[in-house]
Amino acid sequence: MLDLTLASGLPIALGDDFRLVFSDPLPDIAPAVRKATDMLDVWLSPDKAEDREIYYMYRDVHLPEHEELIRGSGLRYDITVILPGKVGHEFIKTAGHYHPERPGSRTTYPEVYEVLFGVAHYLLQRADASSGDIVDAVLVEAEAGDKVVIPPRYGHITINPSSEPLVMSNWVAAGFASEYGMIKRHRGGAYFEIDETTGASRLVPNKRHEGVAPLRGLDPRDLPTLALMRGYPMYQAFVDSPDRFRWLAQPEQFEQELAFVIGR
């Protein structure tokens, strides 16, 4: 049993079966389960996918005393557990998606992740609206305590490149439906991360795209203007200062701050 209380700010642990264990007063939540065969559209080698569980999504996790606060902010806090392993030579990953525009604006919803345990590779990609070409591709390598913002207009995929489980949380605006179509149409994201025989990993471009920008790296960093700092679990950061997370629900008011996080 791996205690995640200090990392998350909530009374949770990771069991030996890779499922979360909730302690009072946190109510139990049943996860949505993703299998490798649910994602045949996005693997580099879909014929290698087996009918096995690869990640668990726990939606709307919160203490009962904070329900009114969270509902009033229009946000949702989730926790995802991604198992270690590969499909063929490709590391296990999420299906990947984009976010829609906030109604009444031309800005898509952002999201923020926090690694609670393990190592995460966040693949961010921005597509040209007319051609579908990937005009920017970014890889962020994050470890426990790091926060990673997905800015407006970027699709994203999370990869577990290690031999241990990856546990991560996220804050996102509640009530919208993620858009999976573009990544499915191109049968995967801009890049696939594969395991070399030497034990190292390599990212290879998805040739099903007409054009893919060179991959650039970006390091996680503290973003105090967005209330995101190492050593300060973002669940607790929200409870302490919910108004400082308005950028998730009203991103058009924070375009300058959100453009800064991607280095553009």
Image (cartoon, rainbow, N blue to C red):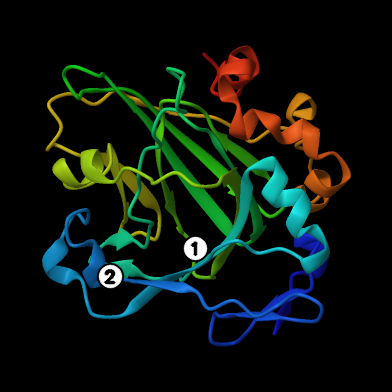
Q: Position of residue 84 (x, y in %)?
A: 45, 70
Q: Nearer the viewer, mark 2 or mark 1?
A: 2
In the image, which disc is placed on residue 36? 2
User: Could you tell me how many numbered marks the image carries?
Assistant: 2
Q: Position of residue 148 (x, y in %)?
A: 60, 39
Q: Judge whether 4 appears above or below 108 on screen.
A: below
In the image, which disc is placed on residue 162? 1
Measuring 12% from the left and 26% from the top, which residue is drawn there?
210
Q: Between residues 97 and 253, which one lies in front from this camera angle?
A: 253
Q: Earlier in the sequence, mark 2 or mark 1?
A: 2
Q: Judge whether 19 appears above or below 168 on screen.
A: below
Measuring 24% from the left and 26% from the top, which residue is drawn there?
212
Within 10 Å of disc 1 (Cα), the crowding (few <14, some 14-19, many 20+) is: some
| Element carrying mark 1 | loop
Question: Looking at the figure, which quarter contains the N terminus?
Answer: bottom right
Q: Judge whether 143 appears above or below 30 on screen.
A: above
Q: Is residue 139 visible?
A: yes
Q: Quadrant of residue 204?
A: top left
Q: Is residue 231 visible?
A: no
Amino acid under disc 1: Ser
Q: Between residues 6 and 220, which one lies in front from this camera angle?
A: 6
Whole-angstrom CA distance, mark 2 to mark 1, is 17 Å
Amino acid under disc 2: Ala
Q: Quadrant of residue 224?
A: top right
